[in-house]
Image (spheres, rainbow, N blue to C red):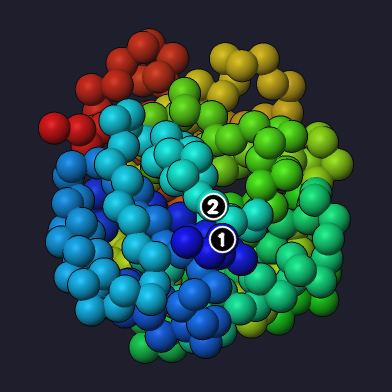
Amino acid sequence: MNTPRISVVGFCDPTHVDQSAQYVDRFLKQTLPHDQFEMLIVEDVQAARFRETLTACAAHHPDLAFRYVEVKLPGRAAAINAGIAQARAPIVAIFADDAIPTADALAAHLHYHESNRDPMAVSIGPMLFRNELRHDPFRRWLEDSGSLFGLSMQQQFTRWPASFFYCGNCAIKRELIDQIGGFDERFVWFTWDDYEFGLRLSAAGGYSQYVSAALAWHEHRVTLGERARVMRTGGHAARLHESFGISNRPWQAMLDSARAQRHMLLPADDEHLPLVERIPTFQAYLNRAFLEGYEAESRGDRTDIVLWRS
């Protein structure tokens, strides 16, 4: 069996709607020839639909190396690490199951890394809502404000923060993973592990660069309630991260704002209002959820979140 030039590790968030057929189909339609990459889907038994999709695709496309990896531990970090451990290529691309790659995405990641041999370099591809999804004001605000991924991920950047990292659509050289280690499996959720990885990446002298051609469409049902759930889990993760002895706490302003408004009832979101008038409501809901998760983790109470294990 030939060694692939790039390995794809796809992880499955069990809270997402099943898009396995579309997801796998988009990798089948990559401009990068099938014999140049392999695809590993890592998941727990809650998302076994991907196993069925892969089995069917593998039978019809023997030229593409598909593998399914069942993960024994909860959380995204454990899933990604399990995939990396079995990946055979010197470059590992990581794609969330709601990151539907455009045809040139893999080729763009590969070209970047084969052109930039620096082992400390990481390629970041954009993950954007299609225009029809951006008609929803809440989605548009999340994307444009940077609230979704930590920065505003537009299709073109003139200045890119080299310290930024996320695992929704990225590619990393195995040399880098061997040097700084994998994702921290103490984060047993689908959040924050990539933030912690990015801190270690920067501390080791690593950096990311934006590769606009490595575009993936963000196909995900996003609502205010869904984001509040994610933010509550993020509050847990932030408090856990603090227990590691970190000194920088960029989320403190969010906690302070939520505490200052703790006595206030959260206003109802009115879809008939202009977006600018709805933004304070969005922020109040998300900040409150983050604080609730943070304080619950401080008490050692995780009953408000689900680890999605059978």
Which residue is at a point 42% across and 34% down the rendered structure image? 78
Q: Is residue 310 above or below residue 135?
A: above
Q: Are marks 2 and 1 in contact (CB under 8 Å)?
A: yes
Q: Residue at x 35, y 63 (%)?
A: 66
Which residue is situated farthest in the top direction here?
299
Residue 13 or 232: which is nearer the viewer? Answer: 13
Please provide percent x and percent y for residue 200: 72, 34
Determine the secondary structure under disc 1: loop
Query: Which quadrant of the view contains residue 253?
Result: top right
Question: In the figure, residue 246 lies in which quadrant?
Answer: top right
Vertical order, 199 against 66 (above or below): above
Mark 2 / mark 1, whichever is N-terminal: 1
Residue 263 visible (yes or no): no
Give the secondary structure at mark 2: loop
Residue 246 seen anywhere in this rendered image of the structure: yes
Residue 221 image offset from top left, x and y in percent: 28, 67
Q: Residue at x 81, y 35 (%)?
A: 203
Residue 310 relative to residue 152: left or right: left
Q: Which residue is mark 1?
A: 3
Circle 2 is placed at which residue position? Answer: 88
90 vs 1, nearest the viewer: 1
- Tell which of 184 and 265 is nearer to you: 184
Give coordinates of residue 303: x percent, y percent.
23, 22
Q: CA distance from mark 2 to mark 1?
A: 6 Å
Q: Residue 118 or 213: which is nearer the viewer?
A: 118
- Identified by mark 1, the residue type is Thr
Q: Please, is residue 101 above or below residue 270 in the view? A: below
| Residue 231's disc number | none
Give amino acid for label 2. Answer: Arg
Quadrant where the C terminus is found in the figure = top left
| Residue 110 coordinates in the image, percent (x, y) | 66, 71
